[in-house]
Image: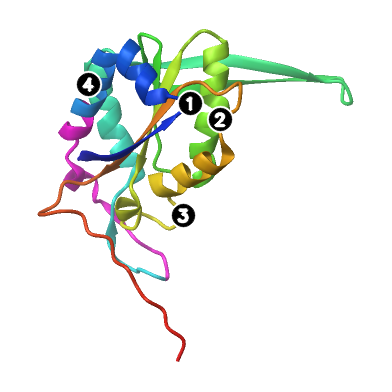
Amino acid sequence: MKVVAEYSHNQGKEFIEKNHKAELEEVKEIVSLVDASKCRTKKSEEITMPGKLLYSPKDFNREFEKLFRQRGWQKAKIRLSTRVPETGRTHSGYREIDMVKNKLGVEVQFGKYAFMVYNVAAKMTIFAKQGVIDSGIEMVPMKSLAREMSTGVSYLEQMKADLEHRGVSNIDIPVLIIGIDCVRGGTNQELHFDFKKN
């Protein structure tokens, strides 16, 4: 696979290049070592593409996790709790981040759009407040790759547009969003359609 595009949220790229240069190089190396052909294993049952062989998010996650762990990256988990006065009860649960090394957190996300935004706008901020990370990398597919996965998988272009228009909050941590795609012959070409009224 390859890194196709990047978006620096709250000066994420600059911060990570300055403070986590070795870890950033490792992340890019890991991306280059993932063989996407091993992950094209999901047979579609969707009406719009019955029987089509798609890329499997679970297989991608497995490949990435294996390569990260071989280089000393570890999952991190924290316990959170909150009391709800109206019910008199306390709710407790865990939050987990995919990989952490030297205070750089990494999330590999091939899921729905809400998870991508949650990772950057909430989860990474919580882990930073707990002292686990000081910055993060959110790894997501490009639109060209998302088209070859199940319906509803989000992509860098959509996330970048929303974060640009949202702006930076005073609680946001530096995050570098990396858009990845498969290595294919030639260049990745987007299909453009002109819909004209008859």
For the record, the magenta segment spans 30-47
Q: Residue at x 21, y 46 (%)?
A: 182
The reply to whether the magenta stretch includes residue 39 is yes
Residue 135, percent across and down? 44, 18
Up the image or down, 145 lies above or below 123; here it is below
State yes or no: discs 4 and 3 in contact (Cβ < 8 Å). no
Give the residue displayed 35% in from the left and 68% down from the top: 49
Where in the figure is residue 143, as x and y percent of width and height?
A: 35, 52
**Real-space Cα distance between discs 4 and 3?**
30 Å
Residue 125 lies in the magenta-colored region = no
Q: Closer to us: mark 2 or mark 4?
A: 2
Q: Earlier in the sequence, mark 2 or mark 3?
A: 3
Q: Which residue matches tag 2?
A: 168
Q: Residue furthest right?
A: 86
Farthest residue, direction bottom: 198
Residue 61 image position (x, y, % from top left)? 33, 35
Gap between marks 1 and 2 measured at Cα: 6 Å
Q: Mark 3: which secondary structure? A: loop
Instruction: Classify mark 2: residues with Cα within 10 Å, few (<14), some (14-19) or many (20+).
Output: some
Are the residues tagged 1 and 2 within 8 Å (C-beta)?
yes
- Name the residue tied to disc 3: 152
